[in-house]
Image (spheres, grey):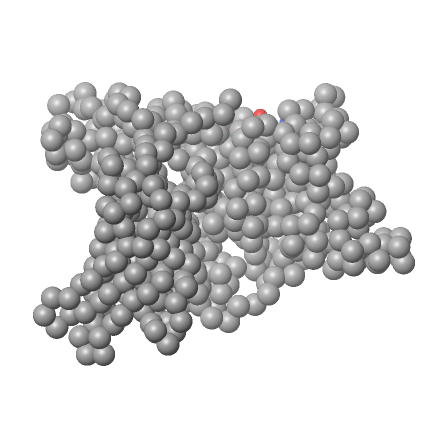
């Protein structure tokens, strides 16, 4: 079985260095490159080399124990947290890195929550154990207190067994746990096994890789086609690339995606280079060339939902041109940035005649200014211009939407209820297929999820809402594809108008 592994951690924990060690042990590269020398397989962008940090998540493909695995190295700097979050959408498993000298950091907790939310089986590697100040006991204590008491030393079978009744029986009988049992505990996220080592000295890495092979061989085959788009790239590239993890079945060049767009080319990237393939199957990460309308978070085939970022910028900035460029003319080109990172929300304000966008922090701002200079040739700067609010529905309400011009018909009833902070957008259905056929129910669900709906107070994006589809009607003859879209949008709008919305203010923990 092919599998996708993400390496995640706070900044400078040694993710890129661990990727080097893994690729070296797998025979993929001839020597372990050094971030500080700018010669790693994955930190290939010039700004990454200059700064010695990872900015973009990038895949590397390798074979180990006859298994094919894709590693996604991710950025650890908080300014690039959305890039790391998108990578999570493509993962079968995660390796959470902890620096043996720094222990659990606040960003480590954020990442751990992301992995929990996306239900990713996670293995922990405590790095930099070659340093004198590193301490096994201190790090384990920190993990247990700040992440979960189910972070357990990989070689401590007894403590792992204590997390599960069946495992305990096995341990009492054999005084150890089989690989299969440990595998199950990790798949069920009952245990987060902890490995210790040093990426730079290549210590403890083979042990980690052997366990990666055990986990990879436990994935189940999914026959039906499914895919998850996690990243779009076009700026500075020769084509628009839709990075997709294939979650089931396969796709071929010239196939038409379920979205209606054709695949012209399939590329498997590994480091700087790519190879063209005719076919991609479950467990592959491919860049699809051809589609123009795809977006990060989009599901294909059996993956029939849209994933939204949970980490988001809270400040809006105004972009000004130092080179006299007319903002309106530059705006369409800047839109390519939105495709790569929708959280930027590059926006045109027609009243003020200015371009605005949302940013996470200073390093991201500098990187973006450089990219805009290099790839679009504009000299720009940013000025802080406001706080980003969100809205939620003020109280539970049933929204009703009709769409019935001549020879069209669709009717939709949606219950909208406020959720607790941070719960995001949830969609459920509570209507029998006798009343509304399954394909219409699915269509309504798609239309709820396909775009960011906005509140009625200040037009800020909605969040923390549960939508329940509770009714709807189609006409045997007169219902066409787009009718349910209109009716769904109208139902949401009508409900929000009736109940009103509450403005949510962002806040940060320090
Ligand atoms: N002593 C020691 N240093 C290490 C080890 N692994 C990495 N480093 C050093 O730690 C620094 C950061 O390493 P990276 O691999 O760039 O860390 P990263 O997690 O990829 O950093 P970002 O991508 O920027 O988040 C570099 O100076 C590495 O040489 C290790 O096992 N021991
Ligand atoms: Mg890195």
Q: Which residue is at the front of the view, 493 or 262? A: 493
Residue that protrudes farthest toward the left in the picture: 406
Q: Quadrant of residue 443?
A: bottom left
State the image coordinates of residue 276 (x, y, percent, origin top left): 40, 59
**Is residue 502 among what the camera can see?**
yes
Q: Which residue is painted at 35% across and 44% down in the image? A: 395
Number of numbered discs: 0
Residue that protrudes farthest toward the bottom in the picture: 476
Q: Which residue is painted at 61% across and 43% down in the image? A: 95
| Left-right relation of 110 to 400 | right
Q: Is residue 301 above or below residue 460?
A: below
Q: Which residue is at the front of the view, 320 or 302? A: 302
Q: Which residue is at the front of the view, 396 or 393? A: 396
| Left-right relation of 167 to 413 | right
Q: Quadrant of ligand 1?
A: top right
**Is residue 374 among what the camera can see?**
no
Q: Which residue is painted at 31% across and 69% down in the image? A: 440
Q: Quadrant of residue 404?
A: bottom left
Q: Which residue is at the front of the view, 154 or 349? A: 349
State the image coordinates of residue 120 (x, y, percent, origin top left): 57, 50
State the image coordinates of residue 335 (x, y, percent, origin top left): 23, 40
Q: Is residue 192 above or below residue 174?
A: above
Q: Quadrant of residue 20?
A: top right
State the image coordinates of residue 86 (x, y, percent, origin top left): 44, 44
Q: Which residue is painted at 56% across and 67% down in the image? A: 221
Work out which quarter of the rendered image holds the N terminus and state it: bottom right
């Amino acid at each position: 079985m092919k599998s996708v592994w993400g390496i995640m951690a706070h900044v400078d924990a040694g993710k890129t260095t661990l990727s080097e060690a893994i690729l070296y042990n797998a025979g993929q590269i001839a020597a372990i490159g050094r971030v500080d020398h700018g010669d790693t397989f994955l930190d290939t962008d010039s700004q990454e080399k200059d700064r010695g940090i990872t900015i973009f998540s990038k895949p590397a493909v390798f074979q180990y124990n006859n298994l094919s695995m894709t590693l996604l190295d991710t950025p650890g700097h908080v300014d690039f947290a959305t890039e790391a979050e998108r990578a999570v959408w493509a993962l079968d498993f995660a390796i959470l890195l902890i620096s043996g000298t720094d222990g659990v950091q606040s960003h480590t907790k954020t990442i751990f929550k992301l992995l929990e939310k996306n239900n990713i089986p996670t293995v922990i590697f405590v790095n930099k154990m070659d340093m004198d100040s590193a301490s096994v006991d201190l790090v384990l204590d920190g993990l247990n207190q700040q992440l979960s008491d189910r972070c357990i030393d990989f070689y401590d079978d007894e403590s792992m067994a204590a997390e599960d009744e069946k495992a305990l029986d096995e341990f009492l009988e054999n005084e150890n746990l089989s690989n299969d049992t440990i595998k199950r505990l990790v798949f069920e996220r009952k245990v987060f096994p902890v490995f210790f080592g040093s990426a730079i000295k290549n210590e403890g890495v083979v042990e980690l890789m052997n366990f990666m092979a055990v986990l990879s061989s436990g994935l189940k085959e999914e026959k039906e086609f499914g895919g998850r788009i996690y990243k779009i790239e076009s700026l500075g590239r020769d084509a628009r690339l839709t990075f997709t993890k294939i979650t089931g079945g396969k796709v071929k060049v010239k196939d038409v995606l379920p979205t209606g767009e054709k695949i012209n080319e399939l590329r498997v990237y590994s480091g700087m280079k790519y190879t063209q393939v005719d076919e991609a199957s479950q467990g592959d990460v491919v860049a699809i060339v051809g589609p123009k309308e795809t977006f990060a978070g989009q599901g294909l085939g059996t993956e029939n939902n849209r994933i939204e970022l949970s980490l988001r910028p809270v400040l809006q900035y105004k972009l000004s041109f130092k080179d006299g460029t007319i903002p309106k003319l530059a705006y369409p080109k800047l839109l390519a940035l939105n495709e790569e990172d929708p959280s930027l929300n590059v926006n045109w304000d027609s009243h003020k005649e200015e371009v605005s966008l949302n940013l996470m922090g200073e390093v991201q701002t500098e990187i973006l200014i450089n990219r805009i200079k290099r790839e679009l040739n504009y000299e720009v700067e940013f000025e802080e211009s406001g706080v980003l609010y969100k809205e939620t529905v003020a109280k539970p309400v049933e929204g009703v939407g009709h769409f019935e011009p001549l020879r069209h018909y669709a009717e939709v009833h949606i219950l909208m209820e406020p959720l607790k902070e941070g719960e995001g957008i949830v969609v459920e259905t509570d209507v029998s297929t006798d009343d509304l056929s399954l394909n219409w129910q699915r269509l309504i669900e798609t239309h709820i999820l396909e775009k960011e709906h906005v509140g009625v107070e200040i037009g800020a994006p909605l969040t923390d809402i549960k939508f329940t589809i509770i009714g709807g009607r189609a006409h045997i003859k007169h219902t066409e594809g787009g009718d349910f879209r209109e009716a769904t949008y109208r139902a949401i709008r009508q409900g929000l108008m009736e109940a009103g919305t509450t403005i949510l203010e962002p806040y940060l923990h320090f």
